[in-house]
Image (tube, rainbow, N blue to C red):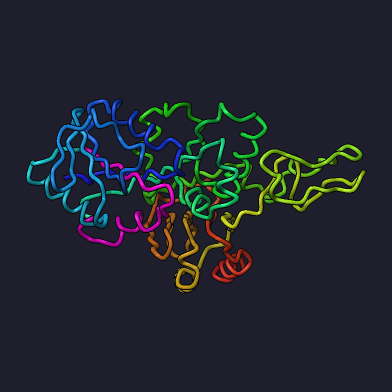
Amino acid sequence: MSLIPATILTGFLGSGKTTLLKRVLTEAHGQKIAVIENEFGEENIDTDILVSETNEQIIQMSNGCICCTIREDLRATLQLLAAKRRKGLLSFDRIVIETTGLADPGPVAQTFFMDDEIAETFLLDSILTLVDAKHSAQQLNDRQEARRQVGFADQLFISKADLVSADDLDALQHRLKHMNPRAPQKVVHFGEVALSEVFDLKGFNLNAKLDIDPDFLTDSAHDHDHDHHHDHEHGEHCDHPSHQNDHNHDHEHGEHCDHPSHGHHHHHDDDVKSFVFRSDRAFEPAKLEDFLGAIVNIYGPRMLRYKGVLHMRGTERKVIFQGVHQLMGSDLGPMWAEDEVKMSKMVFIGIDLPKDILLQGLEQCLV
């Protein structure tokens, strides 16, 4: 039997997770979906599509989908669903786990790797994070949980973009890109997202595709020219959107606004950041394994997502690796093509990770 794909849906309260979920359930196109809600909030799934509630908190919906609340831990819920499916008591093709607004998706993701029984039944497909364009600047400034959710994402959906100006939206997208260059961003209206953009994204598969926006990978990743040379007119205050709380903007008359890394797109100094390591020299496998093991031991809780395609000594194939927090896995990928430049490319997303230590350490693992 093939593995049951699982999707984790996260995002702050009011970002539209339930709207998106309702839409996915009504548009399920013949797929039966089991939804696990971390808790039923105020805006839970409409009761009119619910048929019956059992003591086990598993609810069959009229569209054939199943819903259960997590009162106990996720693993037990997943095992129960799998057992019922095996016995023919429930029928579903995939699961969606909707986390509470403040949840850290990391432990939820780790559940799929740590427990053998779960790993043999379910396949974690991706983490989707919903970002509310109107309130997110404030949420990202104030709440580390919101920043973590962005860092974890395989795909970012931006909702309520019609409520903000084009400049605000642009600034938000730039900010999200700095925090997580791995995740494609999509602006969505009223939860209208095609199913193909929600399911089977393979964000957790150890595949050789490492899609990072090419702009981001230029050597001056954090110094796009257009981010800088924005001298304000004589005497103008610097009051770019969503930025008032970041500084005391009392520039002297005639002073330019030249806060560090601070141009037209305000680069907030968020604690969730990403950086990329690249090299065309091969890695020495034993050295790399020791170094990454040590790093994960020390910084694991602050490492949200990391992924790479590696050029390793002793193999003609690409080595694909990725991890969440302390859990790391690797796999042999396809052969390097004859005309392909063999190059390692790794991206790390985490909370205040020591970029210099990591980059220097990786450099020392090269042949």
Q: Is residue 283 left or right of residue 165?
A: left
- On-image quarter of the C terminus: bottom right
Q: Is residue 5 above or below residue 326?
A: above
Which segment did they paint magenta?
A: 93-118
| 78 to the left or right of 253 | left
Q: Nearer the viewer, residue 231 or 168?
A: 168
Magenta stretch holds residue 298: no
Residue closest to the eye, 144 or 184? 144
Task: Please say whether residue 100 is one of the residues in the magenta stretch.
Answer: yes
Q: Position of residue 183 (x, y in %)?
A: 50, 43
Q: Position of residue 41 (x, y in %)?
A: 35, 42
Between 349 and 362, the residue placed more toward the observer is 349
The residue positioned 66% from the left and 50% from the top of the image is 268
Residue 134 picture quarter: top right
Answer whether residue 230 is visible to the viewer in this image. Answer: yes
Task: Kindly tell me whether residue 346 is visible in this rendering.
Answer: no
Q: Nearer the viewer, residue 68 or 284?
A: 68
| Residue drawn at point x = 66 percent, y = 47 percent | 218
Q: Position of residue 320 (x, y in %)?
A: 42, 55
The percent coordinates of residue 190 (x first, y second) are: 44, 27
Residue positioned most to the front: 42
- Classify residue 23 by image quadrant: top left
Q: Residue at x 39, y 27 (%)?
A: 194
Left or right: where does residue 145 sit relative to residue 69?
A: right
